[in-house]
Image (cartoon, rainbow, N blue to C red):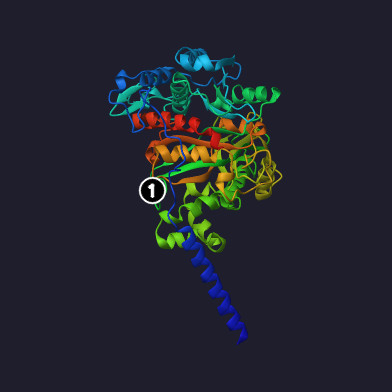
Amino acid sequence: MYSLVFVGIGVTLVIIICLVRFFLLRKPLKYADPNLVQTDLSDSSVSPNGVPSDPLDDPAFHRFRMALAMPTVTPEDKARTNPWLKRFQEFLVEEYPAFGKVAQANVVDDFAIWFKWPGKNEEKKPVLFIAHYDVVPVNEKAWTHDPFEAVLEEGYLYARGALDTKFTLVALMEAVEALAARGFQPDRDVYLAFGGDEERNGTRGAQVLANHFAEEGIRFSWLLDEGSVVADGSLKAARKPLALVALEEKGYVNLVLTVKQAPGHSSRPPGVQAGAVLGKALSAIGKRPLRPRLLPVMKRFFQGIVPLVDRPTGFILANLWLFWPLLHRVLGRNATLAALFRTTMAITIVKGGNTENVLPDQVQAVINCRILPGEHAHDVLEQVKKRIGDKRVAVDYHPDFLVDDPVSLFPGNPEIRDVKDPRDFPGWVPVKGAIERHFPGCPVLPFLNTALTDSRHYRSITDAILRFAPMKLSPREIDRIHGDDERISLENYYTGIAFYISLLENISDS
């Protein structure tokens, strides 16, 4: 009798707790900081409301086309360069004279260039803006337009690198040029650092730049790089576009699986072949993904969208402490969402012999792993070995790729796994304010970056990293990144310039 009473009380308490959390999180999100400095664009061709009336007469438009027209494809050979990388650096120096008068360009080599813009207060830690000017190769036959002609059609510029990420680089340069032209000086020192090999690991660009700053004893309060965007329609349950600011980044490692055997004629195959052993190992990996885990930053994200979804969904998201065991099974059916709470293991390369009648002496497979923050590359290596459970399969790091552990919320203090109030995160307030100014009505939410960025090379010299590109993209537009007919709308380009101007005007808030 008494046990039933206690059970009833317990269930009632759980229901009350769930309802209280739901109604607290259901409160409408607040937008637009009233203390935000309003962007003054009176001396610029940029309009805070969007595209100029005649972009063809606008120098900012033509400079962007110039940048996109340069085929700055990352050299595949680590010992070589691409002359267009140097030409791009010259473009930055030649085309932005007002900024050049207040910030000296420092060219390390074709893969690295940086600027220092002195601020009013030398006592404050500087901030850093980074981007890359190299792009991935193209299959020109699959493009509607020449990928390096920067064709304007129906409000879009078609070009390789339009989204990734000459947009952020040029929009930032347009912003600092406009501000410098009207005599603006930032609140603190501002650094701009651009690399030329992000698409090939960033070891000749971002890594060199980061090492230089470290040698000079320079440490940043925060840095901003590419990463997430204003996602329009990516989460169907939400009723608004979501401005996603990635505060953590997954790690990256390639594992190579090798099974050896004696080579010979295919007419005399052994009872157990290397290909079969490898196949069994790959099957074991596919059937047993690594365990799911809800990061605090993603918990904050889910809580943030409670006011934007229907009531039943909101009730579940408001009470992840209770529903997470069920929710992750449902979300896990969507590969994009599953990547947000699990270290992923993708079988990307399988190779063996090259002749149909000869047994290969070995067969190999490459497993590309994206590591969830809180885990490490060596953990993944050991988990893969454990799942395979066969000593005939050698598992090791791929010798041709970097091993990158995840980048946590606070790179200098990886043991801090949560930030309950994002306003305590360096850079959050000014970045959020600029987003609210130029993407009105879009909730600003913390997020996890599942791909690699150059920012990881700076983890040892900054207190915090934010990853956000100021553009609103639908899922179809996001798919154009690294794809055919990559393009960007003029609305996104000019909004991006205005975003960076607002951000630079308000960095005193960080």
Q: Residue at x 49, y 46 (%)?
A: 445
Binning the other alpha carbons within 10 Å of mark 1 as few (below 14), some (14 to 19) or many (20 upward) gives some
Residue 215 at x, y = what percent? 70, 23
In the foreground, 486 or 361: 486
Rendered view: 117 above or below 427: above
Relative horizontal placement of residue 484, taking residue 7 as reference (left or right) = left
Q: Quadrant of the N terminus?
A: bottom right
Query: Looking at the rendering, which quadrant does residue 324 occupy?
Result: bottom right
Which residue is tagged 1? 240
User: Residue at left 40%, top 29%?
Assistant: 40
Nearer-the-camera pick, 61 or 380 = 61
Q: Position of residue 435 (x, y in %)?
A: 44, 39
Observer able to see residue 348: yes
Q: Position of residue 194 (x, y in %)?
A: 54, 23
Residue type indicated by callout 1: Lys
Quarter of the C terminus within the rendering: top right
**Left or right of 317 in this view: 210:** right
Image coordinates of residue 22 in percent, x first then y, are 48, 62
Q: Secondary structure at mark 1?
A: loop
> Residue 147, relative to residue 346: is it above or below?
above
| Left or right placement of residue 419 versus residue 41 in this view | right
Count of numbered circles in the view = 1
Residue 99 relative to residue 61: left or right: right
509 w.r.t. 133: above or below: below
Q: Kindly tell me whether residue 487 is visible in this rendering.
A: no
